[in-house]
Image: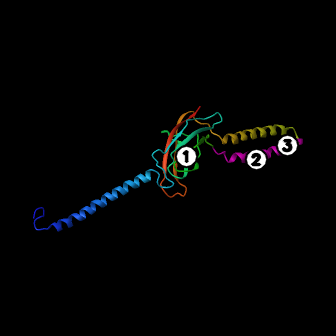
Amino acid sequence: MAGVPYGGTSKQADRQAVPACREDAAMKTSHWFLAGWLIFLFCGGVPGYAASSQFTITASNVTMSASGKGASQFTISEIPVTGTIVLSCGYSGSLALGGLPICPQASYPVKAGGTLTGTVYFYPPVKAAPAEAPAAGAILGGVLVLLLGWRRRGRWWITGALVAAGCLTGMAGVVACGGGSSMPKGNFPYTITAVNGPAAGSGPSFETNVTISVTVP
């Protein structure tokens, strides 16, 4: 019989061909299903999510003012996830430097596909005042009060009062200067990072960043 393998029949050939056809059809179906799911996902088919390929942040450079403060205007586009954006920034230069401006972290509620605009504020670094300064000032103040109480016992109290007042003035200067810090002058790179994720904390998160220049004149 033409077309039939030796030792077999046409029915046996048909039975061998059926499983192969079913396997091929199943593979094609799975491929189409996967392609459809990917299109559905990346076209925003899942509620609360959007395509993240355009998730970007832009920000303006900063020049610190005479008061020691500065500000950068930022824009975040194509937010991927409904939830929050946590914005942080910091010095990103290669050299380890101290006394540079600081910028606090901030959090914003956002919606998928939206745009967020705002301001990142920069401040001079703060140093804690010495703990012994207020105590010393209080002690000197008590001495001054005693001297004023004994003013009738002789003229020597005037000299003592002037000395105590000078010490108090010096201590006040130490306390006042303890809360501030001189910043090094120059241009410094800072990186602002935005992390977007669901408010509940379950699910994927996305990150984008931009580097700006902070100038201390």
Q: Element at badge 1?
A: strand
**At 86% across and 45% down in the image, what residue appears?**
149
Discs 1/3, front:
1
Mark 2 residue type: Ala
Counting residues from the start of the chain, the first of labels 2 and 3 encountered is: 2
Name the spot of residue 35 as percent of width and height, x first.
37, 54
Whether residue 99 can be seen here: no
The residue indicated by pointer 3 is 148
- Asked if residue 137 lies in the magenta stretch, the reply is yes
Query: Chief secondary structure of the magenta span?
Result: helix
Q: Are marks 1 and 3 in contact (CB under 8 Å)?
A: no
Q: Residue lying at the far right in this picture: please name it.
A: 152
Q: Residues within 10 Å of mark 1 (few under 14, many from 20)?
A: some
In the drawing, what numbered circle is on residue 97? Answer: none
Separation of disc 2 and disc 3 at Cα? 15 Å
Please give the residue where the numbered disc 2 appears in the rendered image.
138
> Residue 52: image x %, image y %?
46, 48
Q: Quadrant of the C terminus?
A: top right
Q: Residue 79 vs residue 134: left or right?
A: left
Answer few, some or many: residues within 10 Å of disc 3's Cα (few below 14, many 20 plus, some between 14 and 19): some
**Residue 88: assigned label:** 1
- SS class, disc 2: helix
Q: CA distance from mark 1 to mark 3?
A: 54 Å
Q: Judge by depth and name the residue closer to the eye, 21 or 2.
A: 2
What residue occupies the far front of the structure in this picture? 1
Residue 7 appears in which quarter of the rendering?
Answer: bottom left
In depth, the one of 165 and 21 nearer the eye is 21
Residue at 89 percent of width and 42 percent of height: 152
Name the residue located 66 percent from the left edge and 45 percent from the top edge: 130
- Magenta residues span 127-152
Magenta span contains residue 190: no
